[in-house]
Image (spheres, rainbow, N blue to C red):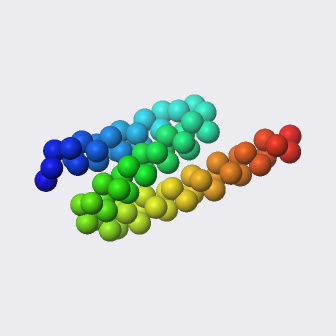
Amino acid sequence: MNIYLELFGYLGTALVLLSMMMTSVVKLRIINMSGSVISAIYAALSNTWPVVLLNLGLIIINAFQLLRLKQSSKTE
């Protein structure tokens, strides 16, 4: 497999792991979603469709939670 594609996949993994170290929920969601986007692209290019579905699910969850956080901060 192409070394650049592998490095791209490792970048996605690193971002998802890095997000777990965040103390801010917003930063955690944004970094995790970025890692999930990269991981989903990598998985699609690697034809690992269960991993694509997992990452798409994480992207949707993170986006929904970010919108919810944004809306709750407006009402406060």
Task: Give the total number of marks visible in the rendering.
Answer: 0
- Which of the 4 image quadrants contains residue 64? bottom right
Residue depicted at 48% across the width and 33% down the height: 21
Above or below, 23 relative to 13: above
x then y, percent, for residue 17: 40, 40
Pick whichever, 37 or 55, lies toward us. 37
Residue depicted at 36% across the width and 52% down the height: 39
x then y, percent, for residue 26: 62, 39
- Which of the 4 image quadrants contains residue 11? top left
Asked whether, in this view, residue 25 is left or right of residue 40, the answer is right
Asked whether, in this view, residue 73 is left or right of residue 66, the answer is right
Above or below, 1 relative to 73: below
x then y, percent, for residue 42: 30, 54
* Name of the residue lying farthest toward the left: 1
Residue depicted at 43% across the width and 35% down the height: 18
Residue depicted at 82% across the width and 43% down the height: 74
Above or below, 57 relative to 19: below
* Name of the residue lying farthest toward the right: 76
- Which of the 4 image quadrants contains residue 49? bottom left
x then y, percent, for residue 46: 24, 60
Q: Quadrant of the C terminus?
A: top right
